[in-house]
């Protein structure tokens, strides 16, 4: 099968992207639009951010449906999928980029902390995948799913226990869905980013880590490649993994970081 020219790689892609109002979700949406995607549905909690993101994507020539929803609730996930299908006609690509990155260790996390984390990071991913997979099966058509995990799924910092556990759960969901539906030509993969430069990370660093102005520059100066992960760089990989150019790639968990995980 010939590799598609980048400008038309996603000409037949109708994508539903959670966390699409900012950060990595928006970067992936823009990359898909740059590569020919003309049908996008963005899901998020902040309607104003979604509207701003939609305006940017429409300027690139894409039709954009915005869906304000709380993906920690299963009925909201079902509604988001239904609205995306209604607005775009069909959905054949799903990006689960929305996530909570709240802190919580094995000694201090409460039941409420645990439930909130798993509701957003695991339940939301599961029911969004369920909706898109059911839709693909009804159409007897291929589909591609990309879950955004984290390098924390391997272990994680001590104050990221429940976050790490939630991402580990989605790693298993990714592989299970991939093997369950490979014969239906539904591919399911994941990217595990490391420390990433996003508006959300700035908030997290200030709220949970006591970071002050200039934290990003100081953090980047200590990194092997002199930077944190940039969303537009990672979006290139995401676009490829979602595309037909990825061929038979399914059930893959791709580490995307400069801190190599070892047993040393």
Image (tube, rainbow, N blue to C red):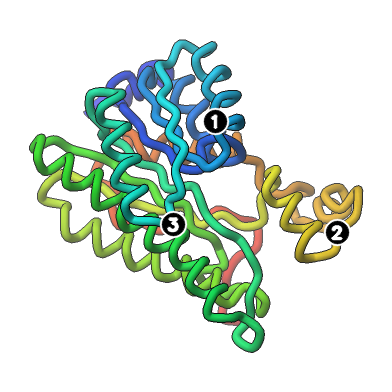
Q: Which mark is residue 72?
A: 3
The residue wearing badge 1 is 50
* Residue 25 sits above or below residue 159 on the image: above
Q: Is residue 255 left or right of residue 75?
A: right
- Element under label 2? loop
**Cα distance between the residues tagged 1 and 2:** 27 Å
Residue at 57 percent of width and 19 percent of height: 56
**Residue 215 visible (yes or no):** yes
Q: Are marks 1 and 2 in contact (CB under 8 Å)?
A: no
Q: Is residue 47 left or right of residue 92?
A: right
Residue 188: x %, y % from top left: 30, 51
| Residue 204 occupies quadrant | bottom right
Residue 58: x %, y % from top left: 49, 14
Q: Earlier in the sequence, mark 1 or mark 2?
A: 1
* Residue 74 sits above or below residue 165 on the image: above
Residue at 72 percent of width and 49 percent of height: 228
């Amino acid at each position: 099968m010939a590799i598609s020219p980048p400008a038309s790689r996603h000409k037949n892609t109708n994508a539903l992207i959670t966390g699409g109002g900012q950060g990595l979700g928006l970067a992936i949406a823009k990359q898909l639009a740059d590569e020919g995607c003309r049908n996008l549905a963005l899901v998020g909690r902040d309607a104003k951010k979604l509207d701003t993101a939609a305006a940017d994507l429409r300027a690139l020539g894409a039709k954009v449906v915005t869906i304000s929803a709380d993906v920690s609730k299963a009925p909201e996930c079902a509604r988001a999928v239904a609205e995306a299908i209604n607005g775009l006609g069909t959905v054949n690509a799903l990006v689960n980029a929305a996530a909570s990155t709240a802190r919580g260790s094995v000694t201090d996390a409460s039941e409420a902390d645990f439930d909130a984390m798993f509701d957003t990071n695991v339940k939301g991913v599961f029911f969004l995948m369920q909706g898109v997979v059911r839709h693909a099966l009804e159409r007897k058509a291929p589909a591609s799913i990309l879950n955004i995990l984290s390098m924390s799924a391997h272990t994680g910092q001590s104050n990221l226990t429940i976050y790490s556990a939630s991402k580990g759960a989605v790693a298993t969901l990714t592989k299970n869905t991939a093997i369950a539906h490979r014969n239906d030509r539904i591919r399911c993969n994941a990217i595990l980013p490391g420390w990433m430069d996003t508006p959300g990370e700035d908030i997290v660093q200030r709220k949970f880590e006591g970071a002050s102005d200039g934290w990003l520059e100081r953090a980047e100066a200590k990194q092997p490649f002199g930077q944190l992960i940039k969303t537009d760089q990672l979006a290139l990989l995401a676009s490829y993994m979602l595309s037909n150019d990825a061929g038979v790639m399914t059930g893959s968990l791709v580490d995307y970081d400069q801190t190599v995980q070892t047993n040393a």
